[in-house]
Amino acid sequence: MPKRNQTLGEFIIENQADFAYSSGELSRLINSLRLAAKVVNHEVNKAGLVDIIGGYGETNIQGEDQQKLDVMANETFIQTLTNREIVCGIASEENDDFITIAGCDRDHQNKYVVLIDPLDGSSNIDVNVSVGTIFSIYRRVSPIGTPVTKDDFLQAGNNQVAAGYIIYGTSTMLVYTTGNGVNGFTLNPALGSWYLSHPDMKIPTTGKIYSINEGNYVHFPQGVKDYIKYCQEEKEDRPYTSRYIGSMVSDIHRNMIKGGIFIYPKSSKATNGKLRLLYECNPMAFIVEQAGGKATDGFKRILEIKPEELHQRVPFFCGSTRMVEKAEEFMAQYGD
Ligand code: AHM
Ligand code: MG
């Protein structure tokens, strides 16, 4: 039973037996992520103080300008996981291809791969709005002791062993699941310790918040347009409130606590939406489902989609179950 104010270290030790195939490896991996998160948190917090923000002169493979903190966060997570030889492979939203950890075919027998979006919502950094890290952990499907393969990363989300996010907000939180519910830890920056502040998180079954970039309204499918009009209708408990930070971790974290729906649909400009199945949607879907919510592409469960590419995008409807189901009803009227 989670105890409030327990540290993350204590929590991991106490709950180690809950991890499937527990050998301590997954615990050590989550420990590495919490360490890297503290380093990134430190840098994010001083972003306004030093000349660290702004374009880094590189464009990532999605064609977006990278900012220095994206690069720093990417390197911090990759280096921490690499130095500790805790995984056999890493795939990052910021890298074209996956990384094979040296020695995974000889010296160490690690069985996990990590997929990571090191700093999501990074266009918000230079305006002092919350950003986040999202991670997802799978057991490799190729034999232990051989180099990792692309198939180790292209697994359906329901194979996830663990997933989590870190939100660098008014306080810094680490929220994660290993498939036994969701727990949230808040960083005490003075002590550098994470404390269990949100044990066994449950998303309300319905809510009054809808989060979508309505600026793209004219490009949305008719089902989404109709759902937005439904949210705005004066009837029963509506109209709902619109809240869109543009930083998915923050938008979903708020909806997890207050109840709500987050939608990033496809549009006539972006045929599969914007968000990446492997780095963004699968981990958030696993967390939200573990908290009792629902995540689909408007028609089918995100966690059942078999990925075909590392950087595949997918429409995303995620949040309170009854709200996602209502949005799906509108989508179903028009088909995909
Ligand atoms: P990023 O990975 O380049 O930071 O993009 C992902 C972010 C999400 O956090 C957010 O929900 C979305 O992009 C906002 O996009 P838009 O500005 O198109 O609404
Ligand atoms: Mg992202």
Image: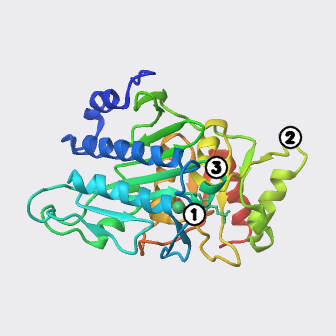
* Residue at far right of view: 234
Which amino acid, by three-letter code, is at mark 3?
Asn
Q: Is residue 324 above or below residue 308?
A: above
Residue type, numbered disc 1: Gly
Residue under pointer 2: 236
For the residues labelled 3 and 1, the Cα–Cα distance comes to 12 Å
Q: Which residue is mark 1?
A: 54
Which mark lies nearer to you, 3 or 1? 1
For the question of whether residue 10 can be seen, the reply is yes
Comes first in the chain, label 3 or label 2: 3
Q: CA distance from mark 2 to mark 1?
A: 46 Å
The residue to which callout 3 is attached is: 128
Sequence order check, earlier mark of 2 and 1: 1
Q: Amino acid at mark 2?
A: Glu
- CB within 8 Å, label 2 to label 1: no
Where does residue 154 sit, x and y in percent of width and height? 36, 68
The disc placed on residue 73 is none
- The CA span between labels 3 and 2 is 37 Å
Q: Residue at x 30, y 72 (%)?
A: 150
- Residue 9 versus residue 75: which sits nearer the camera? 75
Name the secondary structure under disc 1.
loop
